[in-house]
C-alpha cells in the first residue's frame, strides 16, 4: 500500500514505506505538533473476532485483557518459554473485534501462532491488511480520518500490573502524544491523493522513528533480537501485567523481576554529531575497545541531534564513556540510563535528571 504515496512531491519510498519527503527534520516538528501525519506502510492489521477473544488473548500473552474496555489502547507480548520476546502488538477492542497492529515482518508469524492456539474457543484471527492501513500522528491529527479504530499509545505510563524501570524524571516520553489509526483502504488511497494535491501534510517513517527513539520507546522490529527479555527494554511498564494468570514465559518474567536482574539493559545514546555518517542498527557499542553491546535504533532528532537506542551488558558502568562503530571508525556516545543495572522489584534507584538537563 505504500506505493500510493510515491507520487507525492518529494516522496522517497522504500521497502518500509514512505521514508521522507525531502526534509525529515522539519517533518518531525510537524508530526510532533500535529501538523502532519505519517502513513505506516510497515504496519499490518490483524483482527480477532469471537466471544472468547479477550479472555483467550489474556491467557496466551503477557497482558491482562479480559476486562479491556472498548477504545482503550494497550499492548501485548508473545514470549517464548524462556521469556524472550517473539511478537509484540498494539491492542484496541471495539466491542465486537480486537484489533492488533503489528510490524509487517512479524505479522505472518504471529497470525500463524494465533491460529494454532485457537483450540475449541470461539475466536477467529484474520489478516485484515488487504482492507486496512495504519496512519499515525497525534491523537487530534488522526482523529479526523474516519478510522475503524484508533490506538492511543500508553507509553510511557505504567499500566495496571506493570512496572517502570526507568528512573529519570520526567520521563523523556512523558509528553509523547502518539496514536495509530486503522483506516479503510479507500481512505488510505484518498489520503495519498490529498497529499499529491497538497491538501494534507505528510511525514515519513524516519520522522516517526526519531520521535520514538527520543521517547525511549522499544519496538519489536528493532529492540527484540530473539533473546530480548521485556525487562531489558523497560517493556514491563506497558506490555506486561505482573499479577495476571499463567502464560508462556511468565516464570522467567517473574523470576527476573522478583529475584534477579536482566542480563542486559537498554541505554539511550547521545552520539557525537561531528561525523555526518550515522551508525546503523547492529553497529557495535564499545567500551575500551571491547564490544559490550549493539545499537538497535538510530535517528537524527530535530532537537537532540544524532541519537540511538542500544542494548548493552548489565555490567557496563552507567558512567562509562562508550563509543559506537561507524563505518571504518567510531564516534563517542554518551549514555543515559534507561534500565539501571540493578533493575528489579527490590531495586532502589535514585531519580536522575536527563543528561541534557545535567549539562
Image (cartoon, rainbow, N blue to C red):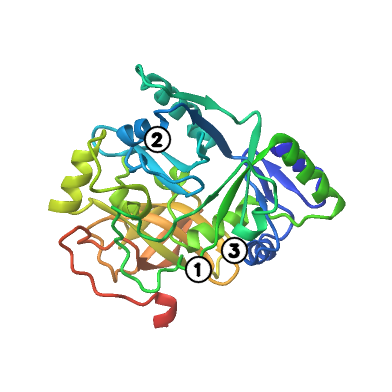
The quarter of the picture where the N terminus appears is top right
Q: Please tell me which residue is depicted at 65% across the width and 61% down the height of the picture.
A: 31
* Residue 135 visible in image: yes
- Looking at the rendered structure, the secondary structure element under dot 2 is helix
Left-right relation of 233 to 330: left
How packed mark 1 is, by other alpha carbons closer than 10 Å (few <14, some 14-19, many 20 or more), is: few
Q: How far apart are marks 2 and 3 (CA)?
A: 48 Å
- Looking at the rendered structure, the secondary structure element under dot 3 is loop
Q: How far apart are marks 2 and 1 (CA)?
A: 30 Å
Mark 3 vs mark 1, foreground winner is 1
Q: How far apart are marks 3 and 1 (CA)?
A: 29 Å
Q: Badge 2 is on which residue?
A: 54
Task: Tell whether label 1 touches label 3 (CB within 8 Å).
Answer: no
Mark 2 vs mark 1, foreground winner is 2
Left-right relation of 88 to 71: left
Q: Where is residue 43 in the image (x, y as percent from the top left)?
A: 57, 40
Q: Where is residue 317 in the image (x, y as percent from the top left)?
A: 25, 66
How packed mark 3 is, by other alpha carbons closer than 10 Å (few <14, some 14-19, many 20 or more), is: few
How many marks the image carries: the answer is 3
Q: Please tell me which residue is depicted at 56% across the width and 53% down the height of the picture.
A: 179
Q: Badge 1 is on which residue?
A: 175
Q: Residue 128 carries which label?
A: none
Q: Where is residue 190 in the image (x, y as percent from the top left)?
A: 79, 42
Pick the residue in front: 292 or 219.
219
Q: Please tell me which residue is depicted at 61% across the width and 64% down the height of the picture.
A: 32
- Looking at the rendered structure, the secondary structure element under dot 1 is loop
Residue closest to the far left: 259
Q: Residue 276 carries which label?
A: 3
Q: Please tell me which residue is depicted at 57% across the width and 72% down the height of the picture.
A: 303
Amino acid at each position: 500500500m505504500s506505493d500510493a504515496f510515491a507520487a507525492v512531491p518529494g516522496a522517497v519510498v522504500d521497502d518500509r514505506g514512505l521514508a521522507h519527503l525531502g526534509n525529515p527534520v522539519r517533518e518531525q516538528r510537524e508530526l510532533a505538533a500535529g501538523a502532519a501525519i505519517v502513513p505506516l506502510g510497515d504496519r499490518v492489521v490483524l483482527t480477532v473476532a469471537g466471544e472468547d477473544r479477550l479472555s483467550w488473548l489474556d491467557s496466551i500473552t503477557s497482558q491482562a485483557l479480559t476486562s479491556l474496555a472498548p477504545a482503550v489502547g494497550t499492548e501485548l507480548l508473545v514470549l517464548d518459554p524462556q521469556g524472550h520476546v517473539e511478537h509484540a502488538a498494539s491492542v484496541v477492542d471495539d466491542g465486537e473485534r480486537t484489533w492488533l497492529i503489528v510490524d509487517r515482518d512479524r505479522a505472518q508469524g504471529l497470525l500463524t501462532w494465533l491460529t494454532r492456539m485457537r483450540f475449541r474457543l470461539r475466536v477467529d484471527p484474520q489478516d485484515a491488511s488487504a482492507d486496512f492501513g495504519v496512519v499515525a500522528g497525534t491523537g487530534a491529527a488522526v482523529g479526523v480520518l474516519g478510522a475503524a479504530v484508533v490506538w492511543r499509545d500508553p507509553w510511557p505510563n505504567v499500566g495496571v500490573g506493570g512496572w517502570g524501570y526507568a528512573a529519570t524524571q520526567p520521563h523523556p516520553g512523558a509528553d509523547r502524544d502518539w496514536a495509530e489509526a486503522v483506516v479503510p483502504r479507500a481512505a488510505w488511497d484518498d489520503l495519498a491523493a490529498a497529499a499529491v494535491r497538497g491538501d494534507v501534510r505528510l511525514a515519513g517513517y524516519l520522522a516517526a522513528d526519531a520521535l520514538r527513539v527520543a521517547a525511549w520507546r522499544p519496538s519489536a522490529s528493532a529492540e527484540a533480537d530473539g533473546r530480548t527479555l521485556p525487562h531489558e527494554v523497560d517493556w514491563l511498564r506497558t506490555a506486561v501485567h505482573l499479577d495476571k494468570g499463567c502464560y508462556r514465559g511468565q516464570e522467567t518474567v517473574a523470576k527476573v523481576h522478583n529475584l534477579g536482574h536482566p542480563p542486559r539493559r537498554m541505554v539511550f545514546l547521545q552520539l557525537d554529531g561531528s561525523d555526518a555518517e550515522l551508525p546503523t542498527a547492529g553497529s557495535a557499542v564499545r567500551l575500551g575497545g571491547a564490544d559490550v553491546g549493539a545499537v538497535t535504533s538510530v535517528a537524527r532528532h530535530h532537537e537532540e541531534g544524532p541519537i540511538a537506542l542500544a542494548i548493552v551488558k548489565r555490567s557496563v558502568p552507567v558512567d562509562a564513556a562508550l563509543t559506537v562503530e561507524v563505518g571504518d571508525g567510531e564516534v563517542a556516545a554518551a549514555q543515559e540510563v534507561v534500565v539501571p543495572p540493578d533493575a528489579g522489584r527490590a531495586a532502589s534507584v535514585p531519580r536522575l535528571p536527563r543528561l541534557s538537563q545535567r549539562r
